[in-house]
Image (tube, rainbow, N blue to C red):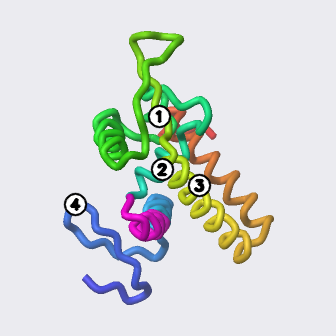
Amino acid sequence: MLCKHSNNFVYLDSIILCMKEKTIDYILRATWIAVSKFYSEEAGKKDSTMATGFALISIDPDEGAPSTSLGPKMGMEATSLSRTLKYMEEKGLIERKPNPADGRSVLIHLTPFGREMREYSKGVVLRFDEAVKKHISEDDLTTFKLVAQSITDLVQSKNIYSTEK
């Protein structure tokens, strides 16, 4: 089906729907896909992945981090996190050490190579922020952050389809 008034298409259950305006969901997903692709390309320059970069940034370089805290911090399921940590250990980025405060748990610590890659990953994120700030006004960024937080709060409230405002 061709839309006469717009080139915006959303694929929903294999049906092409013509839409005048992009949905909020579409804008969020398309934006994140573009950012994710950028981060993946940057990580690839160092033979790494975006997930690895985010994990490195999430690990305190001095104290390490309990493996159980990384998943929620990164928004990652336990299975994916486990696979990412295994990959990072194989690459020599991290090492697992017993948690002195709780003998049943493990702390993830960065190796010297992990610290180096953490700095690279952190630099990529900071350069991205700076590039965005150069192209988008402070007022627009403030509004963006407020809207993003409102959407997050709404979704997390589990009350998204409530008729009350």
Which comes sooner in the sequence, label 4 or label 1? Answer: 4
Instruction: Examine the rendered structure and indicate whether residue 21 appears above or below residue 109.
Output: below
At 40% across and 74% down in the image, what residue appears? 19
Q: Nearer the viewer, residue 109 or 57?
A: 109
At 26% across and 72% down in the image, what residue appears? 16
- Circle 3: is it few (<14), some (14-19), or many (20+) Cα within 10 Å? some
Which image quarter holds the C terminus? top right
Q: Amino acid at mark 2?
A: Phe
- Circle 2: is it few (<14), some (14-19), or many (20+) Cα within 10 Å? few
Q: Amino acid at mark 3?
A: Glu
The residue tagged 3 is: 119
- Circle 1: is it few (<14), some (14-19), or many (20+) Cα within 10 Å? many
Which image quarter holds the N terminus? bottom left
Which comes sooner in the sequence, label 3 or label 1? Answer: 1
Q: Amino acid at mark 4?
A: Asp
Assess whether residue 119 is covered by the magenta stretch. no
The tag on residue 70 is 1
Return the x and y of residue 131 as percentages of the image width and height: 66, 73
Q: Mark 3 vs mark 1: give the one in front.
A: 3
Figure disc tally: 4
Q: Mark 4 vs mark 3: give the one in front.
A: 3
Q: Nearer the viewer, residue 99 or 75?
A: 99
Label 4 SS: loop
Return the x and y of residue 86 as percentages of the image width and height: 30, 40
The residue tagged 4 is: 13
Task: Give the alpha-carbon distance from disc 1 to disc 2, as whole Å.
Answer: 19 Å
CB atoms at circles 4 and 3 under 8 Å apart? no
Q: Nearer the viewer, residue 74 or 17?
A: 74
Q: Mark 2 vs mark 3: give the one in front.
A: 2
At 74% across and 66% down in the image, what residue appears? 140
Q: Is residue 83 left or right of residue 127?
A: left
The tag on residue 113 is 2
